Image (tube, grey):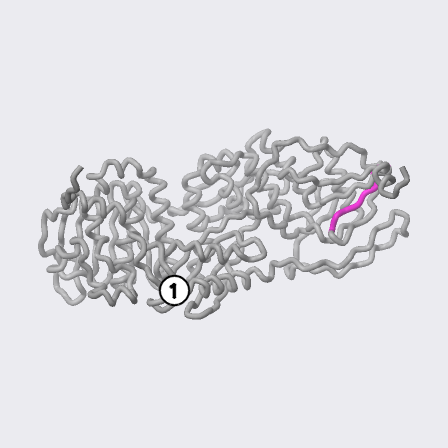
Amino acid sequence: MKIKRLPPDVAMRIAAGEVVERPVSVVKELMENSLDAGATRISVWVVQGGRVSLVVEDDGRGIDEEDLALAVESHATSKIASLDDLESIGTLGYRGEALSSVAAVSRLDIRSRTGDSSSGGRIKSEGGVISSQGELNCKAGTRVQVDDLFFNLPARRKFLKSPVAEMRRITKLIQEYSVAYPEVSFLLYGDTKLVYSTPGSLDRGAVLERLWGDEPKVRSSQGERGNYRVSLWWQEAPRTSRISLMAFVNGRRIDEPTIKAAIASGETNSSGNWAVWIETPPDEVDVNVHPAKTEVLFRHGGDLFSSVKDCAMSLQGDRRPSNPPSLPLYSPESPKTESPKIDFPRPKTKRPEYKDDRGSLFTRVEAPVVKSEPRVSQETPPSVSSKPEDTVFLGQLSSGYLLFDRSGELVIMDHHGAHERINFDRIKKSMERDRAVQSLAIPVPLPPSLQSDCEEHLDKLGELGFDFQRSDGVLQLSGVPDFRGCGSISPLTLLRSSMVGLEGGRISREAVWLRWATIACKASVKLTWRISPQEAMALWRDMNEDGAVAACPHGRPVIITLSDREIASRFERS
């Protein structure tokens, strides 16, 4: 086959497909144009997830009427003029491809007026061909309306997700840009309803707290290495390995694996929400490597990695476990006096106490970190088969494990895993019987980021026992699953843990219950904390209750037994 030049309309649509992948791509390009134009207020209207229509309006500098036709041409821009400008790009856009690409795959309507003009202009195009142009009396700034996206590319249009899924992508994008530009007011409307807004008068940390919520606390850190100044914000999400990251370099949203690798390279669990803000001279970064401008190259990537890693580790530093002092063994024959007090490291905040139905007293503590995704073991581990009265508590090792004498056998127990097993079994029995819901006295408004995540899974969350209501367009949590130990978990923490388990629909209900049991285990002691004889025996009784198995829900053993014969053989007495 001979080589031929592609017709201009075919070449234009191919090029447009690299820039405009889905509705969120259009919103991103138009918003970046607004930010480059100095806008202080950006409003976005979306109909049916952008499949039918979307509008981006700003109060920026505007476009002269005579330049409107040039604005929709390929490689026409006001942001660079020469090859040298590519070496130091200080704007978000620069290629002159955004508006021409959008115009090529949609029906486009642009209205704009500069601040020093008495009137503005309007231009309309269809499939990249201008259909009308003229003067228009409009307000200062620019309004771009995109209708029937991909009407002339049916193959691309049929691969779009549902309106809810496309809207979720757009919402996430605008939320991230509202963090990067807290001085700009963003408003997002979905099918005429206000979905998200920021006032444009907050600092970056305050916008993050509004977006993520203030539970757990959002922490921040700053650092500098070489030519890279880095600011990090982190909201911890215990008991999961998921890292949710938004990263910006010089105000540009990027997907850079180096940053995520630096965050995850620490010694402790780095799961949770992260926001990374990087400032560097423009010539330190090459942004001209990806059609969507989401990938960049750093001149000194090692300095960037080290700077991000140092900041991340400084945020996590107060979570690193310290080595506990040695613990004396408890002897059942010793006088019944108060056990000697050991000076253990404790969190600075006061932890409330609770009593279970058997009167056993425990102290709420942080659950241990698990870096792998929760998995319910499908194997049937051995059960604890002995009467509590046949068992004597001996004491606790300095490593934290409990020692029992069970009719001459030596039993070593991981009491944290044991309590996690007890929690899981109780939750499973409770939830298998019926859908028990505990109504909240005061409904809890969901943070915007959590609300957008929940919208797609309301039915599944309802099956688990969550109830919701809407007030002024804001989704509120009005009820949570009712199970034993639920009172020790905040409603939002319970909801977040369930959302991680439901994403993509890959995990079973048992895995969600396991997450509940895991965070409920915050009410149990840590492995290395001192346990009283009464607490130890209460755990032993609970492990024997209803034939409880001797393994945690993940399948790890909870007890290890050394028989009297095995002990004797170790001493060469058999």
Near-viewer residue (375 or 546) = 375
Secondary structure mostly seen in magenta is strand
Residue lying farthest to the top in this orientation: 433
> Residue 273 location, x and y as percent?
48, 53
Characterize the local packing of mark 1: few (<14), some (14-19) or many (20 or more) Cα atoms within 10 angstroms. few
Residue where numbered disc 1 is placed: 299
Say which amino acid is labelled 1: Arg
What is the span of residues highlighted in magenta in the rendered image? 400-407
> Residue 79 location, x and y as percent?
23, 63
* In this view, 74 is above or below 541: below
- Name the residue at 18% across, 47% down: 12
Horizontal placement of 13 versus 173: left or right?
A: left
- Name the residue at 82% across, 44% down: 393
Horizontal placement of 448 versus 282: left or right?
A: right
Near-viewer residue (564 or 513) = 564
Residue 391 visible in the shown view: no
